[in-house]
Image (spheres, grey):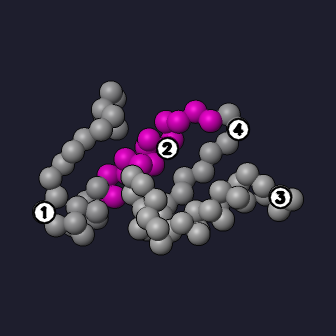
Amino acid sequence: MILGLFEAHLPVSNLNKSIEFYSKLGLEEKYYNSLVAPAGKQLLWMEKSSHMFHPDDAREIENILLNILNPKGML
């Protein structure tokens, strides 16, 4: 992780190779591990979503969030 780096714009010419390359760096896991969350935290990986939710992931994301906020299904 690069301390103080909050955003980087990198040119991509081959999306599949770029995803494979950057995934191997493990930056998302390093960032996740650096977060302090006394009440707990979860890392959610959505195949089609990146910096914003993809419509195909909407139902799954909704169910995950509802289960986190209301684990006993009492709402």
| Residue 41 visible within the image | yes
Task: Decide which of tag 1 and tag 3 comes sooner along the chain.
Answer: 1
Q: Amino acid at mark 4?
A: Ala
Q: Nearer the viewer, mark 1 or mark 3?
A: 3
**Mark 4, residue position:** 39
**Mark 2, residue position:** 32
Q: Secondary structure at mark 2?
A: helix
Give the extent of the magenta segment.
23-37
The quadrant of the rendering that contains the N terminus is top left
Residue 67 spot, x, y in % from top left: 72, 60
- Mark sitting on residue 13: 1
Q: Amino acid at mark 2?
A: Tyr
Question: Does 2 sit above or below residue 61?
Answer: above
Q: Nearer the viewer, mark 3 or mark 4?
A: 3
Residue 25 spot, x, y in % from top left: 32, 52
Q: Nearer the viewer, mark 1 or mark 2?
A: 1
Q: Amino acid at mark 1?
A: Ser
